[in-house]
Amino acid sequence: MIKLSATEQVEELKREIFDFEESLTSPRYHSMSQRKKTQVLQDFLKHLSQSVLSITFKSKSNGISLEQLYGMQEEQEALFLTKYSKVNANFILGHIDLQDKYNELNESHVRMSDELALKLKRIEEDASQIKQLRSELQFCQNDLSSKSETISLVQDELELLYINHLQEKAKWKSQNQLLLQQVYALQEQLTDKIDDAHTSFERNYEAQLSKLKQQLYDVQDELVRMYDQGVHEAGSLQRKLGAAELVKSGLVYQLGSVLVSGAKHRQVAQIPLGVLKVTKEHLIKVISDEITAHESLDEFTDAQKGELAKQHLSYRIGKTVLKDLKGLNRLKKLPVDLIKEVLAFNDEKKRIEMTDKEEQS
């Protein structure tokens, strides 16, 4: 291994410092982690310290050699002056030349020592800057670590909130599905109940309507039978009783009979009641005959027109009045019966008009 002098070591150290400064700006250095960068700086500082110690040691060694050389020179000069005063002038000149060279070497050594001291000072300044950079780097590293911990905590909280949100969303979705199922089930139940109620109502309505129709037909048949029987009996009675019975069945004869009977039996106080009773019975008979006379119009050639006239509002109201007058205890219900008859007439009229429109369309 070749040993270098102090000057060569200083030059070599300058080149190493220059190369190291260039490496600090390279992309490879920037891509290193903070820990790796710190290790590289520490290694270079250690190398600088070792180089400075080596240069200092060599400088001190050179200083000791120069002092010995100075001592030897002085001894040689003294010896030369005492023993060899008559030496050849050429030898003296050579010695003087050697002295000059020695002085030049000494001056060069002093200059190199100054340069080395200056370079050492620069190295110390660079080491101070590197130390400051290390301190700043450590501070940045600590700050980065603290921020990383804060970011980690925030990320954990966000993840926890997101998980809670997903759980709440799943719970809300499950509850909505359950409510929808309950609503659908209730809707189906209500639909079934409505269908059942509608079907039951239609059945009951149809059954009641059929029953009412049958009762109406039975009443009509009974009325026709009673009418035919009444007409037949009335004809027979007229043929049997004759004129005398016709007179006695009249209202005039009946009223006179009540008055005579009351006066004969001294029951004058009962005469008004008897008169009212006879008048009521006669009025009921007249009303019944009036109503019965219009029930069947088969003997008329224009019976159809008569049936249409019976559907008029005037006939229906008059028939209602006669029915209520027939039962005197129903006179209180006469206004209500009239209103019902008018409403029924209007409903039938609207239904007929709608039927006509449907047939026309």
Image (cartoon, rainbow, N blue to C red):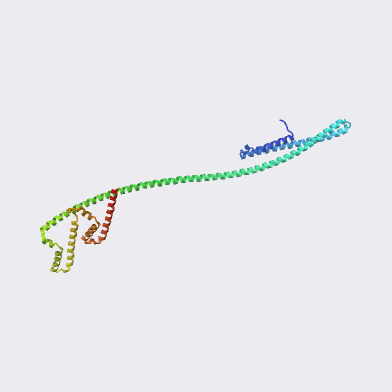
Quadrant in which residue 51 is drawn: top right
Residue 108 lies, in percent from the top left, at 78, 36
Residue pictured at 53% horizontal, 44% vertical = 156
Residue 241 lies, in percent from the top left, at 11, 59
Residue in the foreground of this view, choosing between 208 and 91: 208
Residue in the foreground of this view, choosing between 289 and 44: 289
Residue pictured at 77% horizontal, 38% vertical = 111
Q: Residue furthest right?
A: 86
Above or below, comparing residue 162 to residue 310 in the picture = above
Residue 31 lies, in percent from the top left, at 61, 38
Residue 141 lies, in percent from the top left, at 61, 43
Tell me how many marks there are.
Answer: 0
- Quarter of the picture holding the N terminus: top right
Say whether residue 271 is visible: yes
Position of 236 with respect to 76 (left or right) is: left
Residue pictured at 12% horizontal, 58% vertical = 238
Say whether residue 270 is visible: no
